Amino acid sequence: MAGNHPFSLRALALMSLFAVAAPGPAAGADAYRETYPSAAIDPSRGIAGAGDAGFGSTLQYWQDEKSLEHHRQWIGDPEHEWKLNWKFLDFDRSDDMHPGYLALEAGEKLFKLWAKREPAFRTCLGEGKTDLKGLAATYPKYDPKLKRIMTVESRVEHCAQTALWETFKQGSPANNQISLYFKSLSARAPIRVDTGSAEIMASYRRGEKLFYAKVGQFNFSCASCHTSTGLLGQRFRGQVPTTPFGDAAHFPTYRLALGDIESLQQRFMRCNMQARTKALPPGDPAYTDLEVFYTVLSNDYPVSVPSAR
Amino acid sequence: MAEPMKIRAQLSGDLVAIKVLIGHIMETGQRKDPRTGQLIPAHFIKQLSVGLNGKTVIAAQWGGAISKDPFLGLKVKGAKAGDKVSVHWEDSKGEKSSAEATVG
């Protein structure tokens, strides 16, 4: 029988290897993917980076305290409420009561417990500094020592691993609570992602590509809903999509619908699932790129943690 | 273990606006654990009362339909600065919690 012959077996094995390997490059990076027409966004201008007037047209209503106060009568009005970009739910400024504070308290308790047990955890989070105030506003940033881009969540995961020998996986309650506490120490500090860094800008460009790439069963991209040529400002699933500007400022946030904290990357997962796309795990490089893109679009907007959505 | 409550009592004229935020899981007892297929046991606040200077102003009987981390807001007439607002609840497992705040 031909199958018993050692040579033909090897040939078969080689052929099957080739068959597996051959479509590799074609199905990988260069696969055909539809993209959404891109909008002109200037990353160096942060929240004001919308190129065409229509894209960032709601900025004037929520960019600072005064404009929010001026349009306070829109709250509860379904026609106009979305124009405030839900920024009136950033309670950190109005000293209100909301469950985000319960999450913050839990995070503070957890962090203090671990920092007391192992002081290296604090210095690891602060990259040598013991005062963590204002540090989270510069995330995501490139870490030259680790040679990768760190988000607040991945920093907490890394520090828990190295300083505590504990696994606080990204997206886990412990990671979310500590991240929320760490970010709340930068509340009201303007977001300053370093757009001068080559690594951050490379990541921004990759994230920008993902923002416009159509994926999943519905063939939706982020831009399909969150740009003015898409559904921005129109009703969709009983809600009105808002601009992507300033959105990263309030994460991790307490989601009233979940009764729990949700990080930005978990929000991406939920978004992907609702658009019938296979979601990636939190901390995936693609989500990190998307987080860099979103956070650069929030540059100059103050961190608003804790908040509730 | 019951988490602490947050109470705020703000006076305007003789009307006091009381806000209470309670950290509680409020499990209905009708959800199933997706992994085991077993029902998650009910655990929700059954009785809640708010008092002003020891006199009950609201006594509520709650059930599993109240959301997680409930927020309660009410306004009471005839209060003055320095009055004591007290909130007390008891849940379906018999756990109790009470907290106090001063009107100001």
Image (cartoon, grey):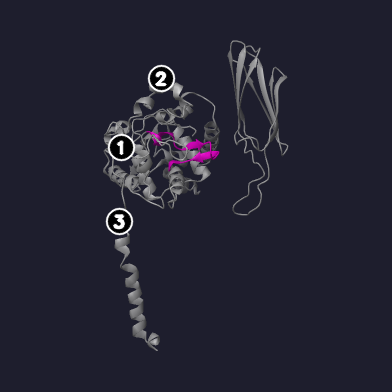
Label 2 sits on a secondary structure element that is: helix
The amino acid at mark 2 is His
Q: Secondary structure at mark 3?
A: loop
Chain identifier of the residue bearing label 2 in the image: A
Picture coordinates of residue A16 (x, y %)? Answer: 35, 74
The amino acid type, in three-letter code, at marker 1 is: Asp
The residue singled out by tag 3 in the image is A32
* Residue highlighted by disc 2: A70
Which stretch appears magenta?
Answer: A246-264
- Location of residue B63 (image quadrant): top right
What is the quadrant of residue A130 in the picture?
A: top left
Q: Earlier in the sequence, mark 3 or mark 2?
A: 3
**How far is disc 3 from disc 1 in space, using C-alphas?**
32 Å
User: Given this view, does label 3 or label 1 mark the residue nearer the observer?
Assistant: 3
**Residue picked out by circle 1:** A194
Q: Could you say which quadrant of the image residue A227 lies in?
A: top left
Instruction: Point out the image quarter for the N terminus of chain A.
Output: bottom left
Which one is earlier in the sequence, the residue at label 3 or at label 1?
3
In which chain is the residue bearing label 3? A
- How far apart are the alpha carbons under marks 3 and 2? 47 Å
Residue A97 as seen in the image, left or right of residue B92 = left
Label 1 secondary element:
loop
Q: To which chain does the residue with label 1 belong? A: A
- Same subunit, labels 3 and 2: the answer reads yes
Relative side of A90 to B50, left or right: left
User: Mark 1 against mark 2, which lies toward the viewer?
Assistant: 2
